Image (spheres, helix red, strand yellow):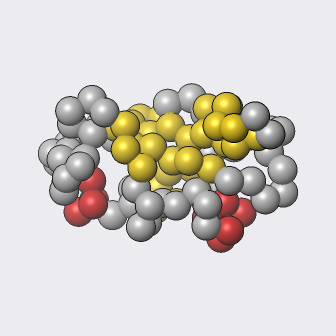
Amino acid sequence: MIIDWHFPTALEFSTYRIEIKAKDGEWYKELSECNGGDAQIAAANFCQVQVQTLLAPPFSLMYNDLVYARVYIIDEEGWKSMSAVQSL
């Protein structure tokens, strides 16, 4: 599953927080495959999460469930800007 984002005002290297909505309605970060603090992921403006990761806790999604993701960018005041929620 590819999660991508674009912030028109983003700096050349920015730090992102990528969150995925779980079956229970809560939003969780997936840091092993989609760590927005990783320079390569941040520069590419996308990450890829394995389906098996989404099926396991804390996400606990089922096959054919929509996957919802949102991305925040950090600015001088903290985590502020959020992308539109994506359904994948």
Task: Judge by depth and name the residue closer to the eye, 44 or 79.
Answer: 79
Q: Quadrant of the C terminus?
A: top left
Evaluate whether residue 44 shows in this view: no
**Does residue 9 sit above or below 59 in this rendering?**
above
Q: Quadrant of the N terminus?
A: bottom left
Instruction: Identify the residue shown where x is 56% and y is 47%.
Output: 17
Task: Judge by depth and name the residue closer to the eye, 80 or 22.
Answer: 80
Q: Position of residue 69 (x, y in %)?
A: 44, 40
Could you say which quadrant of the image residue 32 lies in?
A: bottom left
Q: Is residue 38 left or right of residue 74?
A: left
Could you say which quadrant of the image residue 61 lies in?
A: top left
Instruction: Identify the residue shown where x is 18% and y is 47%.
Output: 60
Evaluate whether residue 71 shows in this view: yes
Task: Judge by depth and name the residue closer to the eye, 63 or 43.
Answer: 43
Q: Is residue 76 left or right of residue 4?
A: right
Residue, far front = 77
Q: Position of residue 10 (x, y in %)?
A: 80, 45
Q: Is residue 9 left or right of residue 14?
A: right
Q: Is residue 28 left or right of residue 6?
A: left
Q: Position of residue 33 (x, y in %)?
A: 43, 66
Total marks shown come to: 0
Instruction: Identify the residue shown where x is 20% and y is 33%.
Output: 24
Task: Judge by depth and name the residue closer to the eye, 83 or 76.
Answer: 76
Instruction: Identify the residue shown where x is 71% and y is 63%.
Output: 43
Q: Position of residue 27 (x, y in %)?
A: 37, 37
